Image: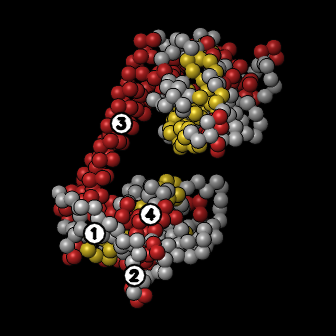
Amino acid sequence: MTRTLPKAFAVWFEDLDLWSVSSFFKIGWHWPEEYIKPLRVALKRKKIVVDKKQNPIETLQLVTLHFDGTMEPRDLKGKTNFKGRLYFAHAGDVIYSKIDVRNGAIGVVPDEMPCIVVSSEYPVYEVLSTVAIPRYIKLVIRTKHFQQAINSMISGASGRKRVQPSQVESMEIPIPSLPVRQAMVDRCQQAQAERQAARVALQTVIDDLNTALYAHYYAHCQNDVLQRRWLVMDWKDLGCWDVKTARATAFRLATPIFEPLGNFVEEATELVKPWDEPEKDWPVYGVNNKEGVFFGYYQKGQAFNAPYKRICKDWFFHNPTRSSVGSLGIVPDVPEDALTSHEYQVWRIKHGLIPGYVDVLINTPFFIELIQFHRVGAVKQRLYVSNLMEIPIPTFPLEEQQRVADARAAALNRIALAEQDATEVATEVEALILGTRSL
């Protein structure tokens, strides 16, 4: 029998907290009533004001709180003054953004950040150890149901809508027995530990190749161009009169046994005009220095205003303005109609190199250092395919390349399994917190 949901409902005015349809949302926790408690029972508001006279801004650790609840140190970029009050928060404390909490900006200060400071836009709460544990609270506030409840509390003018501390403190959550809470936390920590170990395994492959590249360079270079602070060049060797060109030329002359990358790769620009199929959904891919090449979005053909570039598995592309920070990557399995921005530089291997090896190579600090002085331009420097192809690289035997490629493949497979397990665990734990599943 199909259940029909009502299209209209009635609510007494005296029962309303906010006058908006979304405020009618309530989390349907599937727990006995005695386990349901308001957050204020587990959290205590902290307001430890930073004395700026005793604590100069450059000595404090401000953070950026991301929408996934993670935090990272904030670069002050030389700023020595901060308007408004600042407040201390410590490892294990809960903080959230009054404005962006609806997007997921709520989390627990990690152990690796013992003491941070935040503005008044970020309420700080201590997790009471006699009632709950920080990691369990973190699991609760990351659930879809909690996030939906947060979104129902938004008030204020458009663009500056906030969730007030009193609203968060009044939210009800399940607080089961300590063994049950600890079991949920342990399950998530195990999955996260394996995910981190898998990523470390891939980083080890990159680090090992990076060590081999530097060792090969120092064993064969005639002059150490990478560490030297000064250069002397003959006019006849320079194509342009600028420091980057001089350093690139000096590196080439110092490593005569290296070969230009262009001996092995070629540009692969195949332009597509998506508007020729206006109703088609085209898959568009991007690249960054964290994920490499990734799927971005689908876009209707009629929405494109410029030709895009076709990409295929085991091709490569990079962001010309961000290549110096590692925005390069190999194309994974993609649909036949996969595209990327016309601004990105697309290239492919002709011969002599194994794709998996090249993907590790372009992610090494050694290669990124070479990119630094092969870019062109003034203020906004770029690395075009033609510049990339000029970069000299050591010619490792195919057997050595294959060993690196195989290690990379094993690490990527481990990461895929760990990510799959982490996703399954997250779903399982969310059901446990909601109460629709039991241990």
The first of marks 3 and 4 along the sequence is 4
Identity of the residue drawn at 19% across and 67% down: 177
Is disc 3 placed on a helix, strand or loop?
Answer: helix
Identity of the residue drawn at 55% across and 72% down: 161
* C-alpha gap between disc 1 and disc 4: 20 Å
Q: Residue furthest toward the front? A: 1
Q: Is residue 181 visible?
A: no
Is disc 1 placed on a helix, strand or loop?
Answer: loop
The first of marks 2 and 1 along the sequence is 2
In the rendered image, the vertical position of residue 55 relative to residue 380, given as above or below? below
* Amino acid beneath label 4: Ile
Report the front residue among 28 and 233.
28
* C-alpha gap between disc 3 and disc 4: 27 Å
Report the front residue among 184 and 129.
184
Other-residue count near label 3 (Cα within 10 Å), few / some / many at <14 / 14–19 / ≥20: some
The first of marks 4 and 2 along the sequence is 2
**Residue pointed to by mark 4:** 106
**Where residue 200 appears, x then y in whole percent?**
38, 37
The first of marks 1 and 4 along the sequence is 1
**Residue pointed to by mark 3:** 416
The quarter holding residue 345 reads top right
Q: Are marks 1 and 4 in contact (CB under 8 Å)?
A: no
Q: The N terminus is located in which quarter? A: bottom left
Is disc 2 placed on a helix, strand or loop?
Answer: loop
Mark 2 vs mark 3: in front: 2
**Residue pointed to by mark 1:** 29
* Amino acid beneath label 2: Ala
Identity of the residue drawn at 59% across and 17% down: 265
* C-alpha gap between disc 4 and disc 2: 32 Å
* C-alpha gap between disc 2 and disc 1: 22 Å
